[in-house]
Image (cartoon, rainbow, N blue to C red):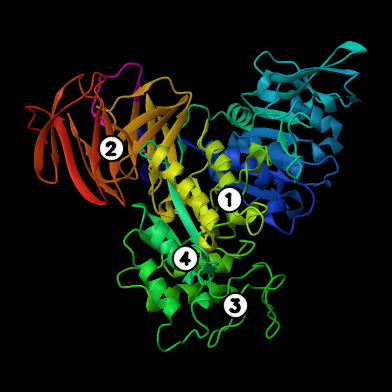
Amino acid sequence: MRLHALAALLLLVAPAASEGEPVRRHVIALMGGSRPRLDTQDIVHAVLEMPLNHLGLVVHRHYVADGPPPEAWLDDTCAVLTYFTSVAEPAEWLWPWLEREVPRRRLRVVHFGNFGPLGADPGRLARWLGGFGLGHDERAVEGAARVEAKVPPEAALEADPRTRAVHRGPRNESAANRVWVETRDRLAPEDVRAPVVTGAWGGLALDPWTLTEGTDNEERRWHLDPFLFLAEALGVRGVPAPHPSVLNGRRMWFLQVDGDGFESLSSVRPNALSAQVMLDEVFRKHALPFTVSIIVRGLTEDYAVAEPTAKMLLAREILNLPNVEPASHGVLHTLRWEEEAPPGEIQSGVGGMMWYPSLANYTYGRVNEVKESIRFINERLLVPPRRCALMLWTGNTLPPEEAILAAGEMGARNLNGGVFRWDSWYDSVGFVSPWSRRVGKALQVYAGAANENDFEGFFDTMPGAFGHVAETIARTGRPRILKPADIYVHFYSAENPVRLAALRKLIRRFAFEEETAPVFASTYVEAVEAAVERARVRKVPNGWVLRDFGACRTARIDGEPRNVDFAKSRGLLGARRIGDSLYLHLAGSDAHVVLAESPEPHPHVEQANCILEAARLAPTGVIATAKGAGDRLVVLAGFPPNARLLLTVGGETTEREADATGRLELRLEGPGETRYAVRPLGDASH
């Protein structure tokens, strides 16, 4: 009876056979040395987490000095990655833990940089590498004159490492492994090493063949292509990856405005506030969604002010626009979030704890900066049912766990931090930040690019300098879509005509001339949260099951030559190929994706620049509601070539014709929500 009871219990907890084999999406990154004061100084977070995110993986960073990683992390972990310096401190638990957990959990292993404390026991390291088909040799030779190296293009991505050549690392002894970099001692030609190698077990990439870490613009360079190397080492090429930066086959676009400079005078018009100019010249002139924040202290000198000030009235006008998403930028604009403010010792201004001086009837605190700013916006500035949607972090954008959680308690999401440049000055993809930052139980979502503060001369000699962010936005959109097209500004971008012209040029290019999908910033934030915390993938015959993708409505499969069989798939709205990647558009949170070499054509959405709600694929057509703040474009595909179609928009039906490839462009003018249906002429199945 006990066996029968156990069998019944297993049937309850085991996934159905149709759900297939789960794909584990977490990587434990083990690091040596002492924990840095700021996450931005954590090298795994700075350079490895972004490419791992792009591959659909979530990173748990852990310092070996803190003991073994939590047991709970291992259930959804696919690999252990080590990133040590050559002088990493010994850790007695490390070898026993690796030798036990890696085979028991069937984990892949990636050793990156140096072996660190693992090299303190050469015999153990030799046995460990032997299990991967690698022979260990401690001897090393340095100098380009002595070392001959074969370095393919994917191992010299941004800089050729041969000028810093070192002959060290294991010998490859297995034909099943792939050697990426091969070195040879010119004085001992038979001595061949493989400092960069991958196999079914994982991968190994030793310095200096990985990257030049650097912190300054002229120093950081990737030698090894992190996307290709990590995809192969972790075995994730061809596996669906949640892709929060893409919606319906297009890169997301949004413009976020920090509240700084709201009350500053603009030279665009005499005696006009920058906020008024931004309202007239940007928010009202472009049929686009904008996420706009305010700083409470910039509007009033008293938190409990009885009658609204003129600046509060202007803020009301802006935040209640239908194409504006209200957000907070704090009460006093904290500058250094990691520091607690001693009572009575709060300093404002440059070098202080916050930007603005104290506010009557307000007590400063890191949680109060969040809760009281959101409360002020909700109660004093917004017309119900509108609510503050986002907390846009201020200052060094490193809020503590309690501040991030406070935003969620107030019904708001959070964004900012992780700003970066990737251009001719900061010339490395290694500067691009990951999706987010884990702080205890909280998740902080990072912005998608630098803001005006990062461009020298913006405040004085070169007011149009922010226009150079276009290079960063362009590079992070192709050939890989790494980030949304995020234009991140402050109200002071409207302080003079040159700054304003640069902003409007950026809007014109990335919102109208490039293939993007304009959304509110919260749409991207929700997608990242879902991708990091909830999305699940399972392998099934001929395809995949996607579960709990929530607001992340895109999955990307790299190197997938097959096409979607829409007739057999469920929960999909469409698909599009960009480069060598297949982008899947989810109609909801879950989908069953069936792939085939040459499936029968089926109507679907190829791309859209707007949000598609209540969408589904009918047997011979497409039905959805197109929602957007401006003109909306939906491109349908999969119809018979030159087919006669019936298009129903808002209750009115007209005839249209697909082009020679079976595509149809549907253009809906102006903002709004429009229900549409497309079906072949004579079909009555809708």
Residue located beneath label 1 in the image = 466
Q: Is residue 264 above or below residue 182?
A: below
- 153 or 408, which lies in front? 153
Question: What type is the residue that disc 4 sits on?
Answer: Arg
Disc assigned to residue 269: 4
Residue located beneath label 3 in the image = 365
Q: Give coordinates of residue 558: x percent, y percent.
A: 48, 27
Q: Give coordinates of residue 546: x percent, y percent.
A: 39, 38
**CB of mark 4 within 8 Å of CB of mark 2?**
no
Closer to us: mark 2 or mark 1? 1
User: Which residue range is magenta in the image?
Assistant: 595-604
Question: What type is the residue that disc 3 sits on?
Answer: Gly
Q: CA distance from mark 3 to mark 2?
A: 47 Å
Residue located beneath label 2 in the image = 634
SS label for mark 3: loop
- 463 or 80, which lies in front? 463
Q: Is residue 603 magenta?
A: yes
Question: Going from the N terminus, do you reach mark 1 or mark 3 first?
Answer: 3
Question: What type is the residue that disc 2 sits on?
Answer: Val
Closer to us: mark 3 or mark 2? 2
Instruction: Classify the position of the C terminus by image quarter.
Output: top left
Q: Is residue 627 above or below residue 416?
A: above
Q: Give coordinates of residue 358: x percent, y percent.
A: 60, 82
